[in-house]
Amino acid sequence: NAGVTQTPKFQVLKTGQSMTLQCAQDMNHEYMSWYRQDPGMGLRLIHYSVGAGITDQGEVPNGYNVSRSTTEDFPLRLLSAAPSQTSVYFCASSYDWRVDGYTFGSGTRLTVV
Amino acid sequence: SQQGEEDPQALSIQEGENATMNCSYKTSINNLQWYRQNSGRGLVHLILIRSNEREKHSGRLRVTLDTSKKSSSLLITASRAADTASYFCATRDSGGSNYKLTFGKGTLLTVNP
């Protein structure tokens, strides 16, 4: 199993550009989520999904869209990048979010200039 | 909003010593989890303790949970240089928003050889 795979690992965007951060897992996990990690802020939940076709907002969803057309993939779209979205983004998945821990990807470091 | 708060923010010890990190939280929880993050990497799940459990062990890790004080501690015994990392507690609420796993800001542990 590859676990949770995130691409790209690094990205530099100009303000106003859009892009998609990819997340894929091969563990048949129903639950997937996106977090951002900023210095001194810990991890904050952006969006999550409890299964294919089901998504919902976390605590910092503005400026981001998600979709979940398959169990394996959960892409995060930045609609119009802003410097405030400079961060490290982590995708995480879980087989049963009620009782299991999360498996994290290695992260995407995004800089918006 | 932050649920778990780790204490101390940073801890420096010698190899072979024990390391203790604490986590306090504010609301009723379903479970509490501890994660490790090595510099520049994703988070790795260490241990999950349910609200009806008081203590759990995994190798050199010992986690306690005191729901009356809304606190948890992570003890790493006989620490090694490879234990150098940030450690995060994360809580899952027992209420309606229990889809969300809320992370603290972490404790940076440095183990000196």
Image: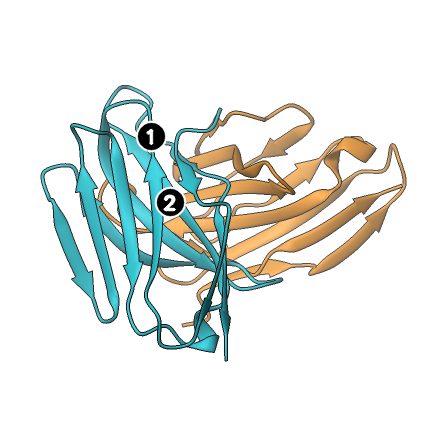
Circle 2 SS class? strand
The number of discs equals 2
Q: Where B13 sits versus A20, above or below?
A: below
> Which of the 4 image quarters holds residue B16?
bottom left
Chain assigned cyan: B
Circle 1 SS class? loop
Q: Looking at the picture, which amino acid does disc 1 mark? A: Tyr
Mark 1 and mark 2 in contact (Cβ < 8 Å)?
Answer: yes
The chain carrying label 2 is B
The percent position of residue B5, horizontal first and vertical second, equals 42, 35
Task: Work out which quarter of the rendered image holds the C terminus of chain A and state it.
Answer: top right
**Relative to B48, A65 lies left or right:** right
Q: Where A25 sits versus B100, above or below?
A: below
Residue sitting nearer the eye, B92 or A50: B92
Badge 2 density bin: few <14, some 14–19, many ≥20, Cα 10 Å: many
The percent position of residue A36, horizontal first and vertical second, equals 60, 41
Q: Looking at the picture, which amino acid does disc 2 mark? A: Cys
Q: Where A11 sits versus B89, above or below?
A: below
Residue position marked by numbered label 2 in the rendering: B89
User: What's the residue at 52%, 57% (across, down)?
Assistant: A24
Of the image marks 2 and 1, the number of the one nearer the N terminus: 1
Residue B25: assigned label: 1
Residue sitting nearer the eye, A109 or B46: B46
**Relative to A78, A33 lies left or right:** left
Residue A104 can be seen in this image: yes
The chain carrying label 1 is B
> Which of the 4 image quarters holds residue A46?
top right
User: What's the residue at 46%, 50% (across, down)?
Assistant: A92
The percent position of residue A8, horizontal first and vertical second, equals 70, 59
The percent position of residue B90, horizontal first and vertical second, equals 37, 41
**Relative to B72, A15 lies left or right:** right
The alpha-carbon separation of the residues under discs 2 and 1 comes to: 9 Å
